[in-house]
Amino acid sequence: NAGVTQTPKFQVLKTGQSMTLQCAQDMNHNSMYWYRQDPGMGLRLIYYSASEGTTDKGEVPNGYNVSRLNKREFSLRLESAAPSQTSVYFCASTKGQATIGQETQYFGPGTRLLVL
Amino acid sequence: GENVEQHPSTLSVQEGDSAVIKCTYSDSASNYFPWYKQELGKRPQLIIDIRSNVGEKKDQRIAVTLNKTAKHFSLHITETQPEDSAVYFCAASIRTGGFKTIFGAGTRLFVKA
């Protein structure tokens, strides 16, 4: 049982390049989330998926797109990377759908992204 | 907009002393308040949470108190140990049609042996 996994661990991009961050969970959780973590700013929600087939914007969605590929996988895409997107990205999941936002979030190990 | 303020940003204590971290939130509809611990280079992990119908919750050396009237909640760690050194995040969550969780900026706790 690996929990929540993310790939890649590190990535360096040039401004304007695109990339997809992958996230998968093997806990049969219904809801999944993408956060970014910047120094002094805590964790900020980018997008979330309450259940398979649905996605919604979070606090800072601009410049990102997401896909809930199936119940296990939730990917985050940067279409045209900008230096302001340099950050550590965390994927998370929770068991419930109806209880979204009201229960323990299980985080992945993070992806450190540098945009030059 | 909604926000969660967390203080202090850095806290240094002697091993065995207590540590207190305080958070205030702005959205009075928030009803779930988790605390996460993040060790250096690791992922955040839940250490304790409290819901709005409860005023206090304890788990061994960790306790959280909630004052809904004043819109603030606090994390208390007693008998601190070096392994308590980490960044601690508070959060306030609200479910109104959609979902929203706002995290505090974090408190870096140093426990000196």
Image (spheres, rainbow, N blue to C red):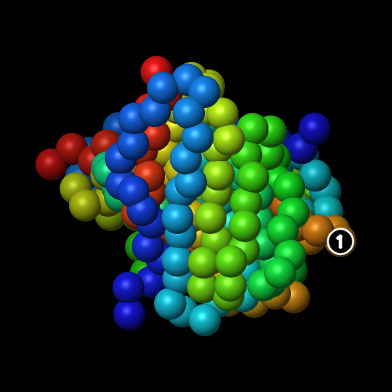
Horizontal relation, residue B29 to residue A16: left or right = right
Q: Position of residue B28 (x, y in %)?
A: 82, 48
Q: On what subunit does the disc labeled 1 rest? A: B
Q: Position of residue B48 (x, y in %)?
A: 49, 63
- Residue at image x 52%, y 81%? A28
Task: Identify the residue at horizontal 74%, vertical 54% (top origin).
Answer: A56
Residue B42 visible in rendering: yes
**Quadrant housing residue B6:** top right
* Residue A93 sits above or below residue B107 on the image: below
Residue A74 image offset from top left, x and y in percent:
55, 61
Q: Is residue A90 shown above or below B26?
A: below
Q: How many marks?
A: 1
Q: Say what amino acid the circle numbered 1 marks.
A: Gly
Image quarter in which the C terminus of chain B is found: top left
Which residue is at the far left? Answer: B113
- Tell me the quarter of the image containing the N terminus of chain B: top right
Element type at marker 1? loop
**What residue appears at the point 44 percent right and 32 percent down from the top-left corner?**
A87
Q: Which is more toward the observer, B30 or B101?
A: B101
Please say whether residue A39 is visible from this viewpoint: no
Identify residue for label 1.
Answer: B97
Which residue is painted at 38% across and 71% down in the image?
A: A3
Q: Quadrant of residue A61?
A: top right
In the picture provided, is B91 more to the left or to the right than B61?
A: right
Going by the picture, which residue comes out furthest to the right?
B97
Q: Position of residue B90 (x, y in %)?
A: 54, 47
Vertical comparison of B95 with B7: above or below: below
Circle 1: is it few (<14), some (14-19), or many (20+) Cα within 10 Å?
few
